[in-house]
Image (tube, helix red, strand yellow):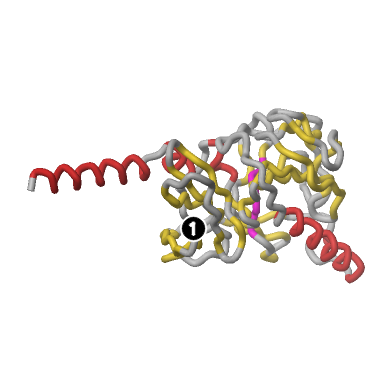
Amino acid sequence: MPRFFSLLMLLCLTFNAHADSYITRTLNKPVPGGVAVVDLGASASAPKATFQGKPVLVVKEQDNWLAIVGIPLGTQPGNHRISSGGRNLPFIVGFKKYPEQRITLKNKSQVNPAPAQLKRIEKELATQIKAYRTFSPNIPSNLILDKPVNGPLSSKFGVRRFFNGEERNPHSGLDFAVPAGTPVKTPARGKVILIGDYFFNGKTVFVDHGQGFISMFCHLSKIDVSMGQQLARGAVVGKVGATGRATGPHMHWNVSLNDARVDPAIFIGAFTP
Protein backbone atom coordinates (compact mmCIF):
# COMPACT_ATOMS: atom_id res chain seq x y z
CA MET A 1 0.00 0.00 0.00
CA PRO A 2 2.72 2.57 0.82
CA ARG A 3 4.23 1.91 -2.61
CA PHE A 4 0.82 2.44 -4.25
CA PHE A 5 0.35 5.82 -2.53
CA SER A 6 3.88 6.84 -3.45
CA LEU A 7 3.16 6.05 -7.10
CA LEU A 8 -0.16 7.92 -6.94
CA MET A 9 1.54 10.97 -5.46
CA LEU A 10 4.21 10.87 -8.18
CA LEU A 11 1.52 10.77 -10.88
CA CYS A 12 -0.29 13.73 -9.27
CA LEU A 13 2.90 15.75 -9.09
CA THR A 14 3.71 14.95 -12.72
CA PHE A 15 0.23 16.00 -13.84
CA ASN A 16 0.40 19.21 -11.87
CA ALA A 17 3.82 20.02 -13.29
CA HIS A 18 2.35 19.75 -16.79
CA ALA A 19 -0.87 21.58 -15.94
CA ASP A 20 1.05 24.38 -14.22
CA SER A 21 3.69 24.84 -16.90
CA TYR A 22 4.65 28.44 -17.66
CA ILE A 23 3.22 28.32 -21.17
CA THR A 24 -0.04 26.82 -19.90
CA ARG A 25 -0.41 29.38 -17.12
CA THR A 26 0.31 32.23 -19.51
CA LEU A 27 -1.48 31.27 -22.73
CA ASN A 28 -4.24 28.81 -21.84
CA LYS A 29 -7.38 30.94 -22.27
CA PRO A 30 -9.81 28.44 -23.83
CA VAL A 31 -12.72 30.64 -24.89
CA PRO A 32 -14.03 31.58 -28.36
CA GLY A 33 -11.30 33.77 -29.81
CA GLY A 34 -8.82 32.44 -27.25
CA VAL A 35 -6.10 29.80 -27.00
CA ALA A 36 -6.07 26.25 -25.64
CA VAL A 37 -2.78 24.68 -24.53
CA VAL A 38 -3.07 20.90 -24.86
CA ASP A 39 -0.46 18.52 -23.41
CA LEU A 40 0.84 16.09 -26.05
CA GLY A 41 3.18 14.24 -23.70
CA ALA A 42 6.84 13.37 -24.11
CA SER A 43 8.43 12.02 -27.28
CA ALA A 44 11.84 12.02 -28.94
CA SER A 45 10.63 14.05 -31.92
CA ALA A 46 8.02 16.77 -32.33
CA PRO A 47 4.51 15.33 -32.73
CA LYS A 48 2.04 16.82 -35.17
CA ALA A 49 -1.42 17.99 -34.25
CA THR A 50 -4.49 19.33 -36.03
CA PHE A 51 -7.65 21.15 -34.98
CA GLN A 52 -10.65 21.24 -37.29
CA GLY A 53 -8.43 19.77 -39.99
CA LYS A 54 -5.76 22.49 -39.79
CA PRO A 55 -2.18 22.06 -38.51
CA VAL A 56 -1.46 23.43 -35.04
CA LEU A 57 1.61 25.06 -33.50
CA VAL A 58 3.57 22.57 -31.37
CA VAL A 59 6.35 23.61 -28.98
CA LYS A 60 8.46 21.85 -26.37
CA GLU A 61 8.58 22.91 -22.73
CA GLN A 62 11.03 20.92 -20.60
CA ASP A 63 10.32 17.26 -21.52
CA ASN A 64 6.79 17.78 -22.83
CA TRP A 65 5.31 18.82 -26.14
CA LEU A 66 2.42 21.27 -26.09
CA ALA A 67 -0.12 22.14 -28.78
CA ILE A 68 -0.94 25.87 -28.87
CA VAL A 69 -4.41 25.88 -30.40
CA GLY A 70 -6.17 28.94 -31.78
CA ILE A 71 -9.93 28.82 -31.14
CA PRO A 72 -12.05 30.62 -33.78
CA LEU A 73 -14.31 33.35 -32.45
CA GLY A 74 -17.41 31.50 -33.71
CA THR A 75 -16.61 28.29 -31.80
CA GLN A 76 -19.41 27.02 -29.57
CA PRO A 77 -18.55 26.53 -25.88
CA GLY A 78 -18.23 22.89 -24.81
CA ASN A 79 -16.07 19.85 -25.51
CA HIS A 80 -13.59 19.96 -28.40
CA ARG A 81 -10.69 17.80 -29.52
CA ILE A 82 -7.41 18.01 -31.35
CA SER A 83 -5.94 15.06 -33.28
CA SER A 84 -2.34 13.98 -32.73
CA GLY A 85 -0.64 10.67 -33.58
CA GLY A 86 -3.92 8.81 -33.92
CA ARG A 87 -5.22 10.16 -30.61
CA ASN A 88 -8.09 12.55 -29.96
CA LEU A 89 -7.13 14.84 -27.09
CA PRO A 90 -9.97 16.77 -25.43
CA PHE A 91 -10.17 20.31 -24.15
CA ILE A 92 -13.10 22.45 -23.02
CA VAL A 93 -14.03 25.82 -24.51
CA GLY A 94 -15.68 28.15 -22.02
CA PHE A 95 -18.09 31.04 -22.55
CA LYS A 96 -17.06 34.65 -23.08
CA LYS A 97 -19.33 37.62 -23.77
CA TYR A 98 -17.84 40.36 -25.92
CA PRO A 99 -19.00 43.99 -25.75
CA GLU A 100 -20.49 46.09 -28.56
CA GLN A 101 -19.06 49.12 -30.33
CA ARG A 102 -20.96 51.59 -32.52
CA ILE A 103 -19.00 53.53 -35.14
CA THR A 104 -20.14 56.27 -37.51
CA LEU A 105 -18.44 56.51 -40.89
CA LYS A 106 -18.85 59.44 -43.28
CA ASN A 107 -17.80 57.29 -46.24
CA LYS A 108 -20.95 55.22 -46.80
CA SER A 109 -19.18 52.91 -49.28
CA GLN A 110 -17.10 51.53 -46.40
CA VAL A 111 -20.33 50.25 -44.88
CA ASN A 112 -22.19 49.19 -48.04
CA PRO A 113 -19.63 48.90 -50.88
CA ALA A 114 -20.66 49.20 -54.53
CA PRO A 115 -20.62 46.02 -56.71
CA ALA A 116 -17.22 46.87 -58.21
CA GLN A 117 -15.82 47.45 -54.74
CA LEU A 118 -17.25 44.12 -53.56
CA LYS A 119 -15.31 42.32 -56.29
CA ARG A 120 -12.14 44.01 -55.10
CA ILE A 121 -12.93 43.11 -51.47
CA GLU A 122 -13.55 39.43 -52.31
CA LYS A 123 -10.24 39.19 -54.19
CA GLU A 124 -8.34 40.89 -51.37
CA LEU A 125 -9.98 38.68 -48.74
CA ALA A 126 -8.95 35.51 -50.61
CA THR A 127 -5.35 36.77 -50.76
CA GLN A 128 -5.29 37.49 -47.03
CA ILE A 129 -6.91 34.17 -46.06
CA LYS A 130 -4.22 32.36 -48.06
CA ALA A 131 -1.57 34.23 -46.06
CA TYR A 132 -3.27 33.36 -42.75
CA ARG A 133 -3.13 29.67 -43.77
CA THR A 134 0.66 29.72 -44.20
CA PHE A 135 2.27 26.99 -42.10
CA SER A 136 6.06 27.09 -42.15
CA PRO A 137 8.18 24.60 -40.16
CA ASN A 138 10.04 27.31 -38.22
CA ILE A 139 9.65 27.42 -34.44
CA PRO A 140 8.59 30.88 -33.18
CA SER A 141 11.38 32.81 -31.46
CA ASN A 142 9.01 33.71 -28.60
CA LEU A 143 5.40 33.04 -27.64
CA ILE A 144 5.16 35.87 -25.12
CA LEU A 145 5.06 38.77 -27.54
CA ASP A 146 6.20 42.36 -27.43
CA LYS A 147 3.66 45.11 -28.09
CA PRO A 148 4.01 46.41 -31.65
CA VAL A 149 3.68 49.95 -30.25
CA ASN A 150 3.60 51.48 -26.78
CA GLY A 151 0.24 53.08 -26.14
CA PRO A 152 -3.19 52.53 -24.58
CA LEU A 153 -5.71 50.10 -26.07
CA SER A 154 -8.56 51.89 -27.84
CA SER A 155 -10.56 48.85 -29.00
CA LYS A 156 -10.38 45.28 -27.75
CA PHE A 157 -10.55 42.00 -29.63
CA GLY A 158 -13.93 40.37 -30.34
CA VAL A 159 -16.03 43.52 -30.00
CA ARG A 160 -19.32 43.30 -31.95
CA ARG A 161 -19.12 46.25 -34.31
CA PHE A 162 -21.97 48.30 -35.74
CA PHE A 163 -21.07 50.71 -38.56
CA ASN A 164 -23.73 53.41 -39.07
CA GLY A 165 -26.12 51.15 -37.15
CA GLU A 166 -25.43 48.03 -39.24
CA GLU A 167 -23.67 45.02 -37.68
CA ARG A 168 -20.53 43.79 -39.42
CA ASN A 169 -17.75 41.32 -38.54
CA PRO A 170 -16.47 41.39 -34.94
CA HIS A 171 -13.19 43.17 -34.27
CA SER A 172 -10.47 40.68 -35.14
CA GLY A 173 -7.54 42.34 -33.39
CA LEU A 174 -6.37 44.96 -30.93
CA ASP A 175 -6.29 48.71 -31.60
CA PHE A 176 -3.68 50.93 -29.95
CA ALA A 177 -4.27 54.69 -29.66
CA VAL A 178 -0.98 56.13 -30.93
CA PRO A 179 -0.16 59.05 -33.25
CA ALA A 180 0.33 58.79 -37.00
CA GLY A 181 3.93 58.03 -37.89
CA THR A 182 4.62 55.92 -34.79
CA PRO A 183 6.97 53.04 -35.75
CA VAL A 184 5.31 49.59 -35.69
CA LYS A 185 7.63 46.76 -34.59
CA THR A 186 7.27 43.03 -35.12
CA PRO A 187 6.62 41.30 -31.74
CA ALA A 188 8.70 38.22 -32.65
CA ARG A 189 11.14 37.12 -35.31
CA GLY A 190 9.48 36.40 -38.64
CA LYS A 191 9.23 36.56 -42.41
CA VAL A 192 7.15 39.02 -44.41
CA ILE A 193 4.64 36.91 -46.35
CA LEU A 194 2.19 39.53 -47.63
CA ILE A 195 2.15 43.25 -48.32
CA GLY A 196 -0.83 45.10 -49.73
CA ASP A 197 -3.03 48.18 -49.81
CA TYR A 198 -6.58 46.92 -49.23
CA PHE A 199 -10.08 48.40 -49.28
CA PHE A 200 -10.80 47.81 -45.58
CA ASN A 201 -7.33 47.27 -44.09
CA GLY A 202 -5.41 49.92 -46.00
CA LYS A 203 -1.64 49.47 -46.10
CA THR A 204 -1.02 46.05 -44.55
CA VAL A 205 1.86 43.72 -43.61
CA PHE A 206 1.66 40.01 -42.68
CA VAL A 207 4.57 38.47 -40.73
CA ASP A 208 4.91 34.69 -40.33
CA HIS A 209 6.46 33.82 -36.94
CA GLY A 210 6.39 30.07 -37.68
CA GLN A 211 3.95 27.14 -37.63
CA GLY A 212 0.83 29.15 -38.41
CA PHE A 213 1.61 31.84 -35.80
CA ILE A 214 1.07 35.05 -37.78
CA SER A 215 0.85 38.78 -37.07
CA MET A 216 -1.01 41.23 -39.30
CA PHE A 217 -0.59 45.02 -39.06
CA CYS A 218 -2.93 47.31 -40.98
CA HIS A 219 -4.08 50.93 -41.56
CA LEU A 220 -0.39 51.82 -41.92
CA SER A 221 0.69 55.15 -43.42
CA LYS A 222 3.95 53.64 -44.67
CA ILE A 223 5.39 50.15 -45.17
CA ASP A 224 9.10 49.77 -44.41
CA VAL A 225 9.65 46.11 -45.38
CA SER A 226 9.61 44.03 -48.55
CA MET A 227 8.13 40.67 -49.50
CA GLY A 228 10.14 37.72 -48.21
CA GLN A 229 12.24 39.85 -45.87
CA GLN A 230 13.45 38.11 -42.71
CA LEU A 231 12.83 40.27 -39.66
CA ALA A 232 14.52 40.21 -36.27
CA ARG A 233 12.34 40.63 -33.19
CA GLY A 234 11.62 44.34 -32.79
CA ALA A 235 12.27 45.27 -36.44
CA VAL A 236 10.16 48.14 -37.79
CA VAL A 237 7.55 46.99 -40.33
CA GLY A 238 5.94 50.38 -40.98
CA LYS A 239 4.37 53.52 -39.54
CA VAL A 240 0.97 54.02 -37.92
CA GLY A 241 -1.66 55.62 -40.14
CA ALA A 242 -5.37 55.73 -40.98
CA THR A 243 -5.54 54.05 -44.40
CA GLY A 244 -8.50 51.83 -45.32
CA ARG A 245 -11.59 51.81 -43.11
CA ALA A 246 -10.39 53.89 -40.17
CA THR A 247 -11.82 56.89 -38.33
CA GLY A 248 -8.36 58.15 -37.36
CA PRO A 249 -4.73 57.08 -36.88
CA HIS A 250 -4.27 53.95 -34.77
CA MET A 251 -2.35 50.66 -34.75
CA HIS A 252 -4.47 47.58 -35.57
CA TRP A 253 -2.77 44.23 -34.82
CA ASN A 254 -4.15 40.76 -35.57
CA VAL A 255 -2.72 37.48 -34.28
CA SER A 256 -3.64 34.22 -36.00
CA LEU A 257 -3.04 30.60 -34.94
CA ASN A 258 -4.02 27.67 -37.22
CA ASP A 259 -6.00 30.17 -39.34
CA ALA A 260 -8.02 31.35 -36.33
CA ARG A 261 -7.90 35.02 -35.37
CA VAL A 262 -7.31 35.09 -31.63
CA ASP A 263 -7.02 37.77 -28.95
CA PRO A 264 -3.53 39.34 -29.13
CA ALA A 265 -3.99 40.47 -25.51
CA ILE A 266 -3.29 36.86 -24.46
CA PHE A 267 0.28 37.14 -25.72
CA ILE A 268 1.10 40.45 -24.04
CA GLY A 269 -0.37 39.71 -20.60
CA ALA A 270 -3.43 41.94 -21.09
CA PHE A 271 -6.21 39.34 -21.46
CA THR A 272 -9.40 39.87 -19.46
CA PRO A 273 -11.82 36.93 -18.96
As displayed, is residue 155 above or below residue 71?
above
Q: Nearer the viewer, residue 19 or 98?
A: 19
Q: Position of residue 179 (x, y in %)?
A: 75, 32
> Which residue is situated farthest in the bottom direction here?
115
Q: Position of residue 122 (x, y in %)?
A: 82, 65
* Residue identified by numbered label 1: 97
Q: Position of residue 44 (x, y in %)?
A: 48, 44
Main secondary-structure element of the magenta-colored stretch: loop
> Which residue is situated farthest in the left direction here?
1
Q: Nearer the viewer, residue 253 or 12?
A: 12
> Which residue is situated farthest in the right direction here?
116
Picture quadrant where residue 177 is located? top right
Left or right: 173, with 58 as reference point: right
Answer whether residue 52 is visible to the viewer in this image.
Answer: yes
Answer whether residue 101 is visible to the viewer in this image.
Answer: no
Left or right: 133, with 242 as reference point: left
The span picked out in magenta is 170-175
Picture quadrant where residue 160 is located? bottom right
Q: Residue at x 54, y 57 (%)?
A: 49
Picture quadrant where residue 226 is located? top right
Q: Is residue 171 magenta?
A: yes
Q: Residue at x 45, y 64 (%)?
A: 88
Q: Is residue 168 magenta?
A: no
Would you call the spot at circle 1 few (<14 residues within 10 Å), some (14-19), or many (20 or more)? few
Q: Residue at x 81, y 66 (%)?
A: 112
Q: Position of residue 253 (x, y in %)?
A: 68, 43
Q: Nearer the viewer, residue 109 or 20?
A: 20
Under mark 1, the amino acid is Lys
Element on which disc 1 rests? loop
